[in-house]
Amino acid sequence: MCLSIPSKVVKIDKQNGMATVDTMGVKREASLALVGEEDIKIGDYVLLHIGFVMNKIDEKEALLSLEAFAKIVELMDEEEPL
């Protein structure tokens, strides 16, 4: 099972077919080889899998997912260690 967290495209390097994405505050490079570069723009939300942008997703859905992930992290931080 794979888990993809929505990531926001913050930079595009068309020459190298790469994008810089922000995933909950962590920036990383991702390949655009599996999607049309012209389909992805700065500010778009995308799903990543093993370093590749798999597809663009709706901003509203991305923000709802990010909110849910943040809540999960918050709840995990509140749990007492074993």
Image: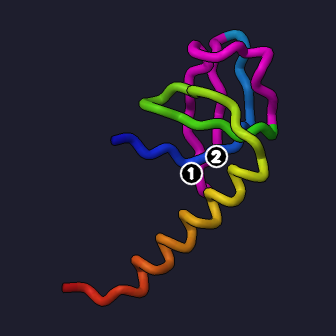
- The magenta-colored residue range is 16-42
Position of 61 relative to 32 (above/below): below
Residue holding disc 2 = 22
| Rendering coords of residue 70 (x, y %) | 57, 68
Helix, strand or loop at label 1? It is strand
Residue 68, how many percent across, how many down?
58, 66
Residue at 62% over, 19% down: 32
Contact flag, marks 2 and 1 (Cβ < 8 Å): yes
Q: Which mark is residue 15?
A: none
Q: Residue visible at 64% across and 46% down?
A: 22
Most extreme residue toward the left is 82
Task: For label 1, count other residues whose C-alpha is less than 10 Å away and answer few (under 14), some (14-19) or many (20+).
Answer: few
Image location of residue 5, percent across then percent down: 54, 48
Q: Amino acid at mark 1?
A: Val
Tell me, yes or no, whether the highlighted magenta stretch contains residue 23: yes
User: On the picture, is 20 further left or further right than 29?
Assistant: right
Residue in front for this viewpoint, 61 or 52? 61
Name above or below for residue 70 compared with residue 23: below
Q: Which residue is mark 1?
A: 26
In this view of the protein, which residue sits in the foreground, 56 or 14? Answer: 56
Amino acid residing under circle 2: Asp
Quarter where residue 29 is shown: top right
Q: CA distance from mark 2 to mark 1?
A: 5 Å
- Quadrant placement of the N terminus: top left
**Residue at the outermost bottom position:** 80
Q: Residues within 10 Å of mark 2 (few under 14, many from 20)?
A: some
Residue 72 position within the rendered picture, expressed as x and y whole percent measured from the top left? 48, 71
